[in-house]
Image (cartoon, rainbow, N blue to C red):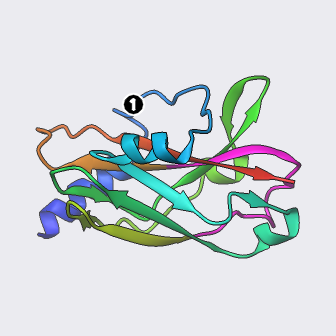
């Protein structure tokens, strides 16, 4: 078990083998989003719109596994902002370290994480942001590929 957590720590702590991030995240209607969420892994965060003052508090981010296989994730995440049509990571997250604990999320289950926006280290402006979180599929052969998932939110 210790060996698995050490390997997971190395995989989740580095930026190699990550899928490319999509450049646009259009909003879906609820019925279309529900059909896409079946057989997928997705994030939810409430609210979807924040004021700058709300970013001083932590929020609950839920990762849900609607696939047919277990996935493994950790505490790490980052926040990106949209500028000139391209997503860029906030500088405050570029050198941030996380505790490398592996959490298994079995099919049909979810795990909630507390996320901080580091508002004391980044001056948020109104605009579009997203949380980026990674997971690994249990059936993937080593080296395991990190799959990125995203949740878009607005700051007003």
Identified at 20% across, 60% down, the residue is 107
- Residue closer to the observer: 12 or 53: 53
Residue 49, quarter of the rendered image: bottom right
Quick check: 133 above or below 148?
A: below
From the top left corner, tell me how far across and down residue 33 is, in percent.
Answer: 47, 43
Quick check: 27 above or below 153?
A: above
- Residue closer to the observer: 98 or 33: 33
From the top left corner, tell me how far across and down residue 16 is, in percent.
Answer: 37, 34
Q: Which residue is mark 1?
A: 19
**Quadrant housing the N terminus:** bottom left
Identified at 33% across, 41% down, the residue is 146
User: What predominant SS class does the magenta segment belong to?
Assistant: loop
Relative to 51, is 75 on the left or the right?
left
Report the magenta residues as a range.
115-132
From the top left corner, tell me how far across and down residue 118 is, in percent.
Answer: 72, 64
Label 1 residue SS: loop
Relative to 122, is 29 on the left or the right?
left
């Amino acid at each position: 078990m210790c060996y698995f957590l050490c390997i997971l720590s190395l995989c989740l702590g580095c930026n190699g083998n990550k899928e490319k991030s999509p450049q646009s995240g259009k909003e879906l209607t609820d019925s279309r989003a529900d059909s896409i969420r079946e057989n997928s892994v997705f994030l939810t965060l409430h609210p979807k719109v924040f004021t700058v003052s709300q970013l001083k508090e932590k929020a609950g981010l839920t990762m849900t596994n609607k696939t047919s296989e277990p996935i493994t994730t950790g505490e790490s995440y980052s926040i990106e902002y949209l500028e000139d049509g391209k997503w860029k990571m906030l500088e405050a997250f570029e050198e941030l370290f996380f505790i490398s604990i592996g959490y298994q999320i079995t099919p049909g289950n979810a795990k909630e994480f507390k996320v901080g926006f580091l508002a004391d280290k980044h001056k948020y402006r109104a605009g579009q942001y997203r949380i980026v979180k990674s997971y690994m599929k249990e059936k993937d052969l080593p080296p395991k590929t990190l799959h990125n998932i995203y949740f878009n939110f607005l700051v007003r």
